[in-house]
Image: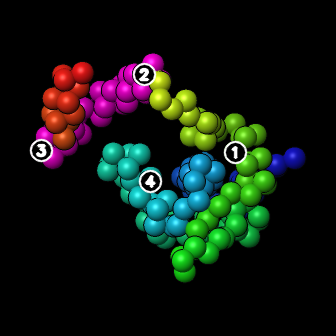
Amino acid sequence: MFGDFGHGEGFRSHKEFGLRYWILALVYKEESTGAMIIDKMEQSSMGFWKPSPGSVYPILNQLLDEGSIELKDKKGKKYYAITEKGKELVNYSWFPWKKFVQPEKTGTVDKTLDDMDNEVEYLLEKSEDIKKSASKKAKLKRIIEKLKKV
């Protein structure tokens, strides 16, 4: 029904293929401008990687052309929104993007603690990068001090 999920649709690399589903997952969760998408990607990598506009906007145009996303004008800005076709691509993809678009169980301490535990695992994997950055070490120290109050 969905072919090979993009391999035959003019993608230049496997990196672009991954960006495609990441973009779909982000606009599935919230209508966003191209700049917002780039910022969200940078935030989720904790500042370690920021995609260039030259890699994001061509994919946005491909997704528009195929009908997976649509444009909405809000106060003169272009916002990208997921379509039903785009939702199907995310929901039936073998990529793990579904975890980014599942409804969150907000307000529960257990959920927050589980999320924090997962984030700490990620930080442990990135500890060498963190040790090299004074600002990241300072930010981590502030977080630890706040957690001590809990």
**Three-letter amino acid code at disc 2?**
Val
Q: CA distance from mark 2 to mark 4?
A: 24 Å
Residue under the point 82% across and 49% down? 3
The numbered mark, 1 or 3, whose residue comes first in the sequence reads 1
Q: Earlier in the sequence, mark 2 or mark 4?
A: 4
- Give the image location of residue 54, x and y in percent: 49, 70
Question: Circle 2: is it few (<14), some (14-19), or many (20+) Cα within 10 Å?
Answer: few
Residue type of the residue flagged with mark 4: Lys
Q: Is most of the magenta stretch helix, strand or loop?
A: helix
Distance, label 1 to label 2, CA atoms, is 28 Å
Tell me where residue 24 appears, x and y as whole percent.
63, 53
Look at the image and give the residue range highlighted in magenta: 109-138
How far is the residue under mark 2 from the one under mark 3? Answer: 31 Å
Q: Quadrant of residue 99?
A: top right
In the foreground, 28 or 41: 28
Q: Which residue is mark 1?
A: 90
8 w.r.t. 58: above or below = above
> Eyeballing the image, is 134 above or below 66?
above
Q: Which residue is mark 2?
A: 109
Q: Amino acid at mark 1?
A: Val
Mark 3 element type = helix
Residue 40, numbered label: 4
